[in-house]
Image (tube, rainbow, N blue to C red):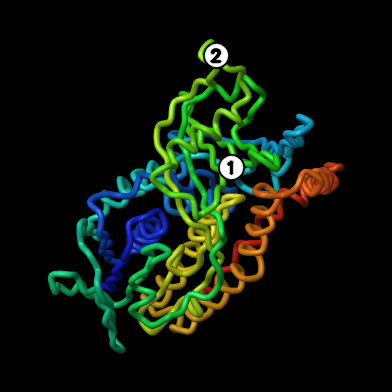
Amino acid sequence: MTHVVVVGAGPVGLIAALGLVRRGIEVTVVERGERPNDSPRAAAYHYPVLEVMADVGILEDVEAAGIRIQENRLWHRPTGEVFITDQGKLAGRVPYPYNVNLGQGELSQIVLTHLQRHPGATMRWSADVVDVEQDSAGAAAVLADGERIRGDWLIGADGARSLVRKAVGLGFDGFTWDDRFVATNIRYPFDRYGYGGANLILDPEVGCIVAQLTKDGLWRVTFAEDDALPEEEIPQRIDDFMQRFLPSEPGPDGRKDFELVAYSPYRMHQRSAESYRVGRVLLAGDAAHVTNPTGALGLTGGLLDVDVLVPALAAVAAGTASEEVLDAYSDARRTKFLEHTSPFASDFKRLVYGGSERDLREAFEAWKSQADTEEKEIEFLLGIGAIRSEQVV
């Protein structure tokens, strides 16, 4: 039986493992942490990703735990104008004409539950990979204690700082933005003020993204700040931002009331490895490419890697396709990232974070014009499908 080692137990690694084990391939997932990371990260999944989730059998559980989002709201905050697009108009054109919002940590737990039902899946927690070795017959993850976990193939899904990518000598070309994102999970009644489940706020001072995470009032607010600011003062700056941004009136104490549940600061990059395959080692997700997450294209891009990689690797394992399809996977997904995902996310970031009032007004009107008829709105909504690749088998 073919054995694949997956390094990294984030959603990309876990869903890749689940897809493989459902195809009869033995999988060992190696993760340096004690459990999946549950800090605020990705939270929104576009319709092409829902198809990937359905393929590995988790979509029903994801929808039960998350929030189904049909409308997306683009706010021009200086004037209070709101532009709404309705994904329900994609009914009959795509299988799932909506998004689902769910925290990345909750998604990982759902996938892990499904994965652990399969006897062919093994989880190795608190296993720190320090090197990767390979030959013509397979590849091994080398742990800090000297143990080698060997498989016929190895998938690096170990994030932007990927040890796997570095171990096989791949560069990571691109650039890093001068600002950092701060993703916050807060409790606040946004729905009282006209907010839907997914909101992009255009404002030169408090531009941000607001998304509903749970049915009981947990929301994600993500804003940007200068990366040179000290991280230890982030909680105070979160409070400062919320006092300026939240739509309610101040209470008797002069403050707007909200509950900060969790937050996560992270730097933003536009980078890609020079290849997503070196011999018996394959890369997926942030190990292969990273983008700023504006527009929810970071994890989306990683799960669309899995969409192509899993059936390709399964076909190679079954002997129905040559190893050349793995090079085709690498080429296809790298091209999509460089030509579609990264430019789209970069344009989106410039729109939401840091634009002048005049630029934001022009951008708002331009976005409205792309959907001023139902036909144009449908074309606009289908645009996210451009970051998906055709199957290579």
Q: Residue furthest bottom?
A: 136
Residue 115 lies left or right of residue 227; in this view the side is left
Residue beneath the point at 54% across and 37% down = 221
| In the foreground, 35 or 18 | 35
Residue beneath the point at 20% across and 57% down = 126
Type of amino acid under label 1: Asn
Residue 278 position (above or below residue 149):
below
The numbered mark at residue 251 is 2
Q: Earlier in the sequence, mark 2 or mark 1?
A: 1
Q: Secondary structure at mark 1?
A: strand
Expressed as whole percent of the image width and height from the top left, the position of residue 258 reads 48, 24
Expressed as whole percent of the image width and height from the top left, the position of residue 338 reads 61, 71
Q: Secondary structure at mark 2?
A: loop
| In the foreground, 344 or 153 | 344
The numbered mark at residue 99 is 1
Residue 242 position (above or below residue 282):
above
Residue 92 position (above or below residue 24):
above
- At label 1, counting other C-alpha atoms closer than 10 Å, the crowd grade (few under 14, some 14-19, many 20 or more) is many
Residue 115 position (above or below residue 333):
above
| In the foreground, 252 or 112 | 252
Residue 360 lies left or right of residue 327; in this view the side is right
- At label 2, counting other C-alpha atoms closer than 10 Å, the crowd grade (few under 14, some 14-19, many 20 or more) is few
Type of amino acid under label 2: Gly
Expressed as whole percent of the image width and height from the top left, the position of residue 191 reads 60, 23
Indicate the quadrant where residue 291 lies.
bottom right
The numbered mark at residue 386 is none
Label 2 – label 1 distance at C-alpha: 35 Å
Question: Which quadrant would the N terminus be assigned to in this image?
Answer: bottom left
Residue beneath the point at 53% across and 20% down = 255
